[in-house]
Image (cartoon, coloured by chain):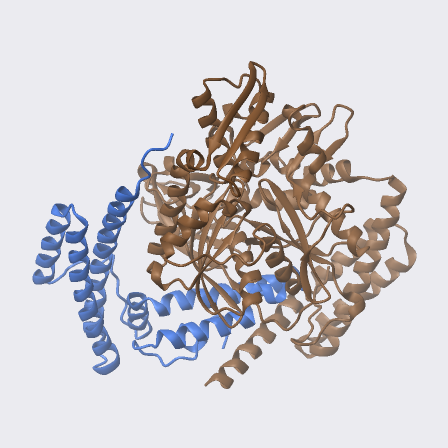
Chain colours: A brown, B blue
Amino acid sequence: MALLQISEPGQAPDPHQRRVAVGIDLGTTHSLVAAVRHGVAECLPDSQGRVILPSVVRYLANGGRQIGQDALTAAAIDPENTIASVKRFMGRGLADITGRDKLPYRFVDQATGMLSLRTVQGEKSPVEVSAEILATLRQRAEDTFNDDLFGAVITVPAYFDDAQRQATKDAAQLAGIQVLRLINEPTAAAIAYGLDNASEGIYAVYDLGGGTFDISILRLTRGVFEVIATGGDSALGGDDYDQALADWVLAQSGQQAVTAGDKTLLKAAARRAKEALSASNIVALSVHLTMGMLQFDIKVSDFEASTAALTARTLSAVRKVLRDAKLDRSEVQGVVMVGGSTRMPQIQRAVADFFGKPPLNNLNPDEVVAIGAAIQANQLAGNDTSGDLLLLDVIPLSLGIETMGGLVERIVPRNQTIPTAMAQDFTTYKDGQTALALHVVQGERDLVADCRSLARFELRGIPPMAAGAARIRVTFTVDADGLLSVAAREQGSGVEAKIDVKPSYGLTDGQIATMLQESFSTAEADMKARALAEARVDADRMLLATRSALDADGDLLDAQARVTIEHLMQALRTTVAETQNAKRVEEATRALADGTEAFAAERMNHGIQKALAGRNVETL
Amino acid sequence: MNLQSDDFELFRLRRQFAQDPVVLDMRWKELQREAHPDRFSAQGASAQRVAMQWSVRINEAYQRLRDPLRRAAYLCELAGTAVNAENNTAMPTAFLMQQMQWREELDESKELSRLEALADQVGRVRREVLKACEQAIDQTKDYGQAVAQVRSLMFIERFASEVDARIDACHDASEAPVGGQ
């Protein structure tokens, strides 16, 4: 609760208050955490020196969990309880998952429209599985710095829709991580790359990860990273290359993978073959299946032929994004390669041929996203107040609402710079209609049925009028994380309704809090002591911030408002001195925060106005 | 200056149609550098909210200023002559004839080269209308004339986006991956 803690630009915070802020690349096949240490962003290793954490979680019959390498190793012997590539299921229903018959998991379709996975420890949602991975990385960061984590920037594929973004944010909350910002993976890569190379101009980021493909076009000018257009395919990645190769080998050999274990083993073998084929022209694949030994020699040309359609799909998305950006491929100065899958020689070649220049790959494609996120996290946490870095990102997919006949009325077009708010007026279609149902959708198609449904809500209490007389303004607001909220207001009567668009996992905030305690609780006494200590630190911060705000801008307040704030401060000081109860301290802190909210807003307005006016005078 | 200032005041630009896109872009980034929520992320929820309002407002102004059609309509509105496109669809006969001719051409054009020729033709007319807009707003201050140009521009842009969509569809069809499983 660092409300009101406004430090002037260029003024570094007290070194003792340096906050631990990290960048997390929550990837389909593996995840990383990075932080700025001694002025340099680097990936943090675990106790055994490994920076890469396989994104695999195994649920054990005894109630324990394995996360990372141990889980990955166990995938073949316990495939049903070992969840890999869970990112593909985030914010998704069962019907969204193509090729699920090839996966070893026991999927459950929830009444809420989201899927979950049946394990030996019961049903687990993708959000819970991702939270295990995030909590492991959080622990790694806290062990590294021997301090609590202040917050994290978490990366998502640029092409993630609202449901997938919200699911990622919920997973972080479940893991006890404050999300400073969700940023797009290609944008993070551009930060790491651009700042490293002091680049200016138009750049493309080609990001082929384990399960997603993103292509972004950015303009870099003096520390500003402006995304012009973004596109891709949220269900296309290195996994598909493994699967295509596995399918091809089965078809060629005439053998069958009958069990879940067979499927996992074969895919893992295909994956090893794929990696080996980056360095040699022929690789022998051999794997023990239930029906017998499968042995097959794979030539590099076989691999390329069996996956050529996938590579072509990526290039098709590249053409589309260039058209969106209204740019010719020759205007692109450099192409940054991100994601382990870009190590495949056929990808490097295809991209080089397309752009007519060799792609840039001087940074480790596995680490570059986490490193860019760490640089942004460090700035957002207020550790680096030079403020040189500014991200202007866009929403990847259009947002709209359903109108008559199942058609989509677009309200926010794709590639709109965020944050943004856009409104459109609608009306009633029946005499005396008092309610209006709103169905929020995301996608580029004209029919609602072809778009992703994000939320439904109702505006009730419209005064009865003739059809067409009501003026209902629907406003879409997309924040800097790319998350949507929708408000509807009848202009004549002032009746309104509002919704934060959250996919329904059937998890309320209260349930999330309970799960949090269940999954990460240590001894109860420890918890209490820690909670009280944290509450007191927050209270002190709040008091200090309020005091310095009053000193700086007290003249913005009238006498009455000032007295109210002084009272709240006194009440908080008394509570801190007299109670051992963390909850009561938190309540008093919150009371002060609420009581100073209007003042904080006023100060912000003043500050921004002054800054804007100052700028303009300078530049005129 | 406040959140209610008009786009030109906010960007400290002369209230006129002619604008330098480079200056506009530079000013946009300067303003966002001051007001973007990322600048205030360590400062709590209400600071975030206020920053978001400013940042949204700056983006809104930028979108309107950089789009010539929206900029022209906005200038007419600021001058007290609303465009009222939804209530006033009467257009000159010559203009409507041209639209019909374009539509026929679009329906008949199957190959890319013919579609691109049509797009070029539409683009030429668009530039002429924009010049007339600039003349009416910046020189003669004839907002009645400007509004008429804005209305034709609306038709032209809608048609141009249909042509673009057809060109895109053509590209997509020629790029569809062959083979595959």
Q: Residue at x 17, y 66 (%)?
A: B124
A439 left or right, relative to B169: right
In which image quadrant can residue A133 be found? top right
Residue closest to the eye, A439 or A56: A56
Question: Can you say which quadrant of the picture contains the C terminus of chain A?
Answer: bottom left
Up/down of A537 relative to A61, above or below? below
The residue at the point 51 percent across, 73 percent down is A222
Kindly tell me whether residue B5 is visible in this rendering.
no
Q: Position of residue A238 (x, y in %)?
A: 51, 39
Q: Residue B11 in the image: x percent, y percent?
A: 44, 76
Q: Give the number of callouts.
A: 0
Where is residue A132 shown, x and y percent of the image?
A: 69, 39
Foreground pick, A605 / A285: A285
Furthest-front residue in this view:
A281
Question: In the drawing, does residue A541 fall left or right of residue A366?
Answer: right
Residue farthest to the top, as pictured: A291
Q: Give the residue drawn at x 77%, y 64%.
A: A542
Q: Is residue A534 left or right of residue A205?
A: right
Q: Is residue A332 visible?
A: yes
Q: Is residue A174 above or below residue B137?
A: above
Question: Could you say which quadrant of the image residue A34 lies in?
Answer: bottom right
Q: Nearer the viewer, residue B118 or A579?
A: B118
Which residue is at the front of the view, B80 or A102?
A: A102
Percent position (x, y) of residue A115?
A: 56, 30
Q: Is residue B92 left or right of residue A461?
A: left
In which quadrant is the N terminus of chain A drawn?
A: bottom right
